[in-house]
Amino acid sequence: MSVPALKLTYLNDVVPALRKSLGYTNIHQVPKVDKVVINSAFGAEMDKNGVIELRKDIASLSGQSPVVVKAKMSVSNFKLRHGMPVGIKVTLRGNQMWDFLLRLIAIALPNIRDFRGVPSKLDGQGNYTLGIIDHSIFPEINVERQRVNTGMDISIVTTASSDEEGTELLKLLGVPFRKKSTSSEQAAA
């Protein structure tokens, strides 16, 4: 089995760079990507065929079968009953995680129209969540057939202990963070 390209980049380039910039003496202190969670929620009004099609789409872009999340309680204002499907999630680890991250960073994000980078706000513990409005930016999704465009959240969970470590790790892996605009650029806009 071959090693994914992004994992090789992590091992050969990112780990030495992080050890040098953050001053780690032990290689096990270097933060790494632990898992990637893809979550897509939909309303209670989605029919059964829509759920099946969305499940096929998420399975094709993640490489493994997603889990259908069902409602835990009934909420009459949202026309939601206990046990109705309300979302789909999949957790990626290992080689599938590295392959998905490479496709996300190198192919899917540049496919977004007028793309200027992703926000650089992490959650305070070194993890990053990215919201995507339309999942058809991935090349695995067939856009010719009639379907509803749904969004998804992609959470990249790292072993970093702070946002600075997590940001540095993700930058070195190639995540295209938005550049900080200066006050002169804001005045011109």
Image (cartoon, rainbow, N blue to C red):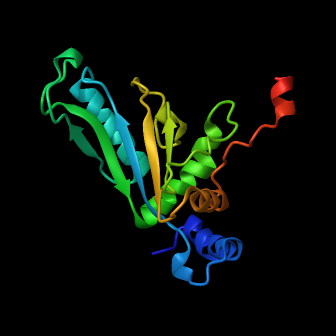
Residue 176: x, y in percent?
A: 66, 48
Residue 183: x, y in percent?
A: 83, 33
| In the depicted structure, whether residue 34 falls above or below residue 131 | below
Outermost residue toward the bottom in this view: 26
Q: In this view of the protein, which residue sits in the foreground, 143 or 71?
A: 71
Q: Residue at 62% across / 45% down in the picture?
A: 120
Q: Residue at 45% across / 75% down in the picture?
A: 1
Snapshot quadrant of residue 167 = bottom right
Query: In this rendering, would 124 be left or right of 91?
Result: right
Snapshot quadrant of residue 117 = top right
Q: In this view of the protein, which residue sits in the foreground, 34 or 134?
A: 34
Query: In this rendering, would 103 be left or right of 113?
Result: left
Q: In this view of the protein, which residue sits in the foreground, 52 or 152?
A: 152
Q: Residue at 49% across / 37% down in the picture?
A: 131
Q: Residue at 64% across / 70% down in the picture?
A: 14
Residue 2: x, y in percent?
A: 50, 74
| In the depicted structure, whether residue 106 falls above or below residue 132 | below
Query: In this rendering, would 105 be left or right of 73?
Result: right
Residue 175: x, y in percent?
A: 63, 52
| In the depicted structure, whether residue 98 falls above or below residue 17 | above
Outermost residue toward the top in this view: 77
**Looking at the rendering, in which quadrant would you find the C terminus?**
top right
